[in-house]
Image: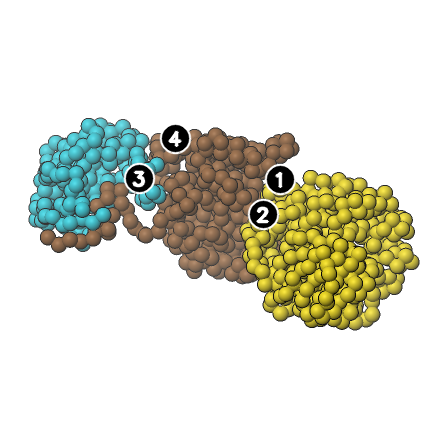
Chain colours: A brown, B yellow, C cyan
Amino acid sequence: MATTTLLNTQKKESRWGMTKKNVIWKRKDLLGLEDLSADEIALILDAAKSFKEVSTRKVKKVPTLRGKTIVSLFFEPSTRTRISFELAAKRLSADTIGITANSSSVLKGETLKDTAKNIEAMNVDVVILRHSTPGAPHLLAKVLGPSIINAGDGAHEHPTQGLLDLFTIKEKKGTLKNLKVSIIGDIAHSRVARSNIWGLKKMGADVTVCGPSTLMPVGIERMGVKVTNDLDQAIEGADVLNVLRIQVERQKKGLLPSIREYINLFGINRQRLKNAKDDMLIMHPGPINRGVELTPDVADGPCSVILEQVANGIAVRMAVLFLVTGGKE
Amino acid sequence: MDILIKDGYIYDPANRREGNFDILVSCGKIKTVAKKIKAQASKVIDARGKVILPGLIDMHAHLREPGREDAETIETGLSAALSGGFTGVCAMPNTEPCCHNQEVAEFLLKKAQVLGKANLYPIGAITKNREGKELSEMSELKNAGCVAISDDGNSVKDTAIMRRALEYAHMLDMPVISHCEDTDLSADGVMHEGYISTEMGMKGMPAVSESTIVARDLQLAEFTGARIHIAHVSCKESLDLIRAAKAKGIRVTSETCPHYLVLTDETVKSFDSNFKMNPPLRTEEDMKALRAALKDGTIDVISTDHAPHIESEKDVEFNYAPFGIIGFETAVAVISTDIVSKNIITWNDVAEVMSNHPAHILGLDKGSLGEGSDADITIIDPDEEWVYKRDEIKSKSKNSPFIGRKFKGRVKHTIVNGDIFPI
Amino acid sequence: MTLRGKSKLMTKEALDKAVMRISHEILEKNKAIKDLAIIGIRNRGEYLAYRIADNIKKISGQEASLGILDITLYRDDLTEVAEQPQVQETRIDFDISGKDIVLVDDVLYTGRTIRCALDALIDFGRPHRIQLAVLVDRGHRELPIRADFVGKNVPTSLKEVVEVRLNESDGKDEVVICEKE
């Protein structure tokens, strides 16, 4: 009999082996989409598809992460991201604890590192961090053993939001390649915009950013996006409009003359959409300022996939939790 | 004690001397500079292959005492300075209490004198408590030993106060060292505003927040006739203004720091707060402009802006970390490795920008290797390769972006008033 | 690890025959086809399930419900594997409550896959009955699990590996037994 080295065959024989692609997830942490390759992003999106099915079952729970402890450490208020992560963890049977650290421990003089080290000492497997400072999760990833998931660091990145946006678009359009995606609003202060730009560009989409010049950060075009201040231009030919939340405080800081003027220039209503493609998707990371960036009829209209984004968020976060807990990087 | 330094290569721009010479030091003064000195000396230094510079003077440093002795003291600061080849250090007045009166200046000088390490030159505040509201008693400060005035760390925001400060300092012939920053433009910023800050979602400090105040202060200097020294220039916009002002005859001098000559805002991508300083590291283009300005004389001085911070304050989220890095012990090495070795300037230029020019601007009888001068001498091995290690830092704080960096060029001896400090 | 090809256990003809026989046996034991559901375990069980469902349709003229189960999320060895395996979609788009389910897999070995599959199925509802059909039963059970329908019983040693190759995934139909070296 012939002797053969059957590494491939071995994989096929393995009862678990489903070797669709040769990409293997090795990361301990998910800090941002800037660091990920297109293959890694595709891997998460594929996995999320399977996890989405779990949420449609009667028993919305699988035992995959049984015995793992996941802590969400939120230094900024957030309802939806936190709930989404906690539901994702619970549906994977992990134990979750949510800590809203606001400034209480900071006021006591405890540093972020101290807080996190204390949490680590309790044998936690994953820390989900929301923080107002760019790089805070990177700081923790350097010193902590548990996996770190960035749930938003200042205006830097919000990778799971980026991924769920990509997932939603891909689900609706079949692909991301060559799609025209326009991101509208406060680009300068938006971590959602940055994660979307990194992710979309890596997956071959064509990205335009649109907003008032005072909310457009310098040099953004070097990220490979088209820049415009003209909403009609951003809408025309777009397959997707991802509309960002506008913080009303921006007006006080002198970045906008008034919300009224913002609505006139960048608010999206049915009239503004008259030249839009029929099958254009409208997305929003939430929470929506109804009547500011989107009128209610558009937010709730047929193009809107805003609530599907919310549902997909859980699937994507389940996929991320599943992958990082196996990452040994 | 007599010291004989044999066969070193001397750069002494003050006396237009360059070449292999012996130096005999006696009674704290340079006694003889000549080829092949035959004399008995209690200490002989074989300086073959070494670079001999007039003692380096750092025009811009923070020694933290009084107030933040946990970060640095006069003793640790001056030890670190000696280790980095500095025979003289200017202490910026942003201490607690602020150096805005005679007592603090005298305290500093007295303490330094007792220590007998590097020379210390206090800089007084422009305004009381550096608040930018009322002028400090500059004459008293001058009498107490202050060599210049500055509100460093703060920009004098009120243009009228800046005008009066320049007029008053002019009367006393004191240079005004200006930290140029429009804090409305740079508000909440933590790094240079540019593509990298956009990528990272960090609040930026635009170059124009520096250059607008440079422009203002140059106009005020022209108007008042006073001498102005622009501290830590970081961007090309400022350089263009300074170059034009010099051409016009305005009495302006300027400085930059080693880190602005070798690092850019790209480094911030590491989220390491040891790349956070004010003004911030700027772009490659700015870095190149600074190198060119150093070469063409627009930049007169290299200072360190040595700014010690304790680890627990620095090792936090980037936004919360204080600005500044230590610099005494790496300045010569950085300049040697990345500037002199790359033929941007010569060692003779280094003697000018790190010794002769600072002495001249501050009115110090220093910066010369002439016979009869104070024996302040820095001896450098330009070829020694070494690695800057955290454990070997003499400064009390360790906030340096250069830890672990391999350098070529190392200070071997620092001689202050005839006393040798081996490194 | 290298594998040495040892011998062919089943040819394409034998494999087809075995699948057909299993299909007949399933029909004998499950009279009410409207309550019958064939659920294949990914990957090769999926393809075998398709074949069985096709056979049942040919024989009886009626269609049994068909589902695919990915058991990755129920594995008991996730903490031990080097990196997370790829998760694939589970597709059971009918209510399994009250159904007579036939789980289909290629090789029955330790029984752990089937344990996972049973856990997974229970999360979908409360079936009337769950049966198990496998192409090859090679022994060495680690759990109290047995198959109701078996294509071929093969006594093996622990050093041996049984490979089911199917046209859909491997380009040909056969079962071979190899030895680990």
Which amino acid type is shown beneath numbered disc 2? Arg
Query: Disc 2 vs disc 3: which is toward the camera?
Result: 2
Q: Quadrant of the N terminus of chain B?
A: bottom right
Secondary structure found at label 3: helix
Seen in the picture, residue B174 relative to A121 is either above or below; the reply is: below
Can residue B297 be seen in the rendering of this structure?
Answer: no
The answer to which of marks 1 and 2 sits earlier in the sequence is: 1
Query: Disc 4 versus disc 1: distance between alpha carbons?
Result: 35 Å
Q: Locate residue B397, reporting x and y percent.
A: 65, 44
Marked residue chain, label 2:
B
Q: Are marks 1 and 2 on the same chain?
A: yes
Relative to B140, is A270 on the left or the right?
Answer: left
Query: Disc 2 versus disc 3: distance between alpha carbons?
Result: 48 Å
Which disc is residue B390 wearing?
Answer: 2
Residue for point 21% across, 45% down: A13
Query: Disc 3 vs disc 1: which is toward the camera?
Result: 1
Secondary structure found at label 1: helix
Determine crowd level at label 4: few under 14, some 14-19, many 20+ residues with C-alpha closer than 10 A: few
Comparing B106 with C169, the one in front is: B106
Comparing B248 with A277, the one in front is: B248
Which disc is residue C72 wearing?
Answer: 3
